[in-house]
């Protein structure tokens, strides 16, 4: 919580004003009982109505001042806490954007969503409570105690029995609260995870008639959250009535002993009533402290989860003094590159990979599932960093290049074509926000997308649903390719990006790419061998190593793995 307090600095004026106005409300609350004690003891008892009315007016004015102070405190505490939460959520989101793929593997998507939403809300709520209760509860307790002692020191001894009981209850509950609230947030991660997975894969669920299974799966996660929530709720529920019993017992004791003092003439009725008010204020303030500390327990669990994200060391960043010189040619070299995922055992995913790609050359990568094809191309934009060896681009180690400059020179078409809510034009603008209509049409024409876009009533202003749900798989792939082409990259990476496109469209696409990307270094990962037979070179991977490299004809003579892939797809008679 202390580290996160820095997010209050921009709102220090509101954070300072809130407790100051709360101080006004507290002073009004402490002075109030003195007024009605005087009304009862000096006004009503003597029949002096003028005095009673005069004191009543002053009392009303005091109440009004207190109300104004309370409203102003709420306003400023809300301003500071909402600003705090907004800035914290912004920095959390920005930190996640900096994460490498390795960092992202450390957190589930559902957990990050919970931390950005529910956890921030919990901490924001406690900040608002802090700005109110930090002044109110201690001052009301201390001020009430001073006022009570000033009325009757002997009667104040009742608190010697009430306060220790309250502390014992509070300490007992707090010792159990923190681990429970940590589990609540973890279970909430689980519910969010099931819900996110279900909504993402709703079409598959319906296709396989698995709705009942998913409902049971969600119910299991939801019940787990309910069980731990109920356990935490019972703890909170136990605290409030216990403290009310102590408070009401204390009031009964005050009435008992106060009545005796009235009978003996050492106290007046109005003073006893004022004393009860002060005792109630003290115990109520302490109960608010207990509730506040309970919320602190929950907020601390959330704050720890937030700090876990903020404190995560981003393992891929731009080095100080990194080169910002643009990539001009696109010559790419792998020098004895090996790679192993962080924390993974067994052999590395890639071992001793070495090759050079000249500008304008097209390199195809083939191999069975899991041999490291996608991992290999993911090293180029530094989604991961090599474990051993190095990768150079135009002779510069990519780790010595400005990360933004490096990635800006690379066009990526990933296995899963991700589109975002917005128009087709807005999605294409990810490639180049400044592209004009002529450039956009040129890119979509090459990607074989212009024709189907033009068939829509709104054309390029057609709205794309979340994740492109209103487009076919082939349409999404062609838009993703057009988006990458708009960047005019020096290096183009196409990771199985034509799997949903028919052979005729793919052939026209490849022809257009060869013409358009003559000066672009291109990597193509494909499942269909027919898609890469015309590549300048084909790299064949097996067990994370290069087992063959060359043109199609060369590999058909020298690489058994390539021959097996060819025969499995095109048949023995094609050899």
Image (cartoon, grey):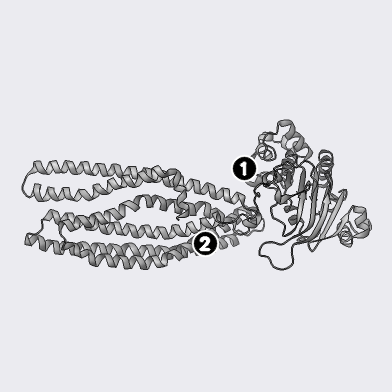
Is 126 positioned to the left or the right of 463 in the image? left
SS class, disc 1: loop
Label annotation for residue 421: 1
SS class, disc 2: helix
Query: Outermost residue toward the left?
Result: 46
The residue under the point 84% across, 55% down is 539
Q: Please give the count of numbered marks on the rendered protein.
A: 2
Asked whether 229 or 8 is in front, the reply is 8
The residue under the point 70% across, 55% down is 385
Q: Earlier in the sequence, mark 2 or mark 1?
A: 2
Tell me where residue 250 sits by quadrant: bottom left
Is 300 positioned to the left or the right of 566 in the image? left
Image coords of residue 1 (percent x, y): 45, 56
Q: Between tags 2 and 1, which lies in front?
A: 2
Image coords of residue 63 (percent x, y): 23, 44
Is 131 positioned to the left or the right of 525 in the image? left
Residue that numbered label 2 is attached to: 186
Image coords of residue 550 (percent x, y): 89, 54
Query: Outermost residue toward the front?
Result: 321
Asked whether 159 or 255 is in front, the reply is 159
In space, the residues marked 2 and 1 are separated at their CA atoms by: 30 Å
Q: Is residue 503 above or below residue 559?
A: above
Image coords of residue 13 (percent x, y): 39, 42
Q: Is residue 388 above or below residue 517?
A: below
Asked whether 403 or 427 is in front, the reply is 403
């Amino acid at each position: 919580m202390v580290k996160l307090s820095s997010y209050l600095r921009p709102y220090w004026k509101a954070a300072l004003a809130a407790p100051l106005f709360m101080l006004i409300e507290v002073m009004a609350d402490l002075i109030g009982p003195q007024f009605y004690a005087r009304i009862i003891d000096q006004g009503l008892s003597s029949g002096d109505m003028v005095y009673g009315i005069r004191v009543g007016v002053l009392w009303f004015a005091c109440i009004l001042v207190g109300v104004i102070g309370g409203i102003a405190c709420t306003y400023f505490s809300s301003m500071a806490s909402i600003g705090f939460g907004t800035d914290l959520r912004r920095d959390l989101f920005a930190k996640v954007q900096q994460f490498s793929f390795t960092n992202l593997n450390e957190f589930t998507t559902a957990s990050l969503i919970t931390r950005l939403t529910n956890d921030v809300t919990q901490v924001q709520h406690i900040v608002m409570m802090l700005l109110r209760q930090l002044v109110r509860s201690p001052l009301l307790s201390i001020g009430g105690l001073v006022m009570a002692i000033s009325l009757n020191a002997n009667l104040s001894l009742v608190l010697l029995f009430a306060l220790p009981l309250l502390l014992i209850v509070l300490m007992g509950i707090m010792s159990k609260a923190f681990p429970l609230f940590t589990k609540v947030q973890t279970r909430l991660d689980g519910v969010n995870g099931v819900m996110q997975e279900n909504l993402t894969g709703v079409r598959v669920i319906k296709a396989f008639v698995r709705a009942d299974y998913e409902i049971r799966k969600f119910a299991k996660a939801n019940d787990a959250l309910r069980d731990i929530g109920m356990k935490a709720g019972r703890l909170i529920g136990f605290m409030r009535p216990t403290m009310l019993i102590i408070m009401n017992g204390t009031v009964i004791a005050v009435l008992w002993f106060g009545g005796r003092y009235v009978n003996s003439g050492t106290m007046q009725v109005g003073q006893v009533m004022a004393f009860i008010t002060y005792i109630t204020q003290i115990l109520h303030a302490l109960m608010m402290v207990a509730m506040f500390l309970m919320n602190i327990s929950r907020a601390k669990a959330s704050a720890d989860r937030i700090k876990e994200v903020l404190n995560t060391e981003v393992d891929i960043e731009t080095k100080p003094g990194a080169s910002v010189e643009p990539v001009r040619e696109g010559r790419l070299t792998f020098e004895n590159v090996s790679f192993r995922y962080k924390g993974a055992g067994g052999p590395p995913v890639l071992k001793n990979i070495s090759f050079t790609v000249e500008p304008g050359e097209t390199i195809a990568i083939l191999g069975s599932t899991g041999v490291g094809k996608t991992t290999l191309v993911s090293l180029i934009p530094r989604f991961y960093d090599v474990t051993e060896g190095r990768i150079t681009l135009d002779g510069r180690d990519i780790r010595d290049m400005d990360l933004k400059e490096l990635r800006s020179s690379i066009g990526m078409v990933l296995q899963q074509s991700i589109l975002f809510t917005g128009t087709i034009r807005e999605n294409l603008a990810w490639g180049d926000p400044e592209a004009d209509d002529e450039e956009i049409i040129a890119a979509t024409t090459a990607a074989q997308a212009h024709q189907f876009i033009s068939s829509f009533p709104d054309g390029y202003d057609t709205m794309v649903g979340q994740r492109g749900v209103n487009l076919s798989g082939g349409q999404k792939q062609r838009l993703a390719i057009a988006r990458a082409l708009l960047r005019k990259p020096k290096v183009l990476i196409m990771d199985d990006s034509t799997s949903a496109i028919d052979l005729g469209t793919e052939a026209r696409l490849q022809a257009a790419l060869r013409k358009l990307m003559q000066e672009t270094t291109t990597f193509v990962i494909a499942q269909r061998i027919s898609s890469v037979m015309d590549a300048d070179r084909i790299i064949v991977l097996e067990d994370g190593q290069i087992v063959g490299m060359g043109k199609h004809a060369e590999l058909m003579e020298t690489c058994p793995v390539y021959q097996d892939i060819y025969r499995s797809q095109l048949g023995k008679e094609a050899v």
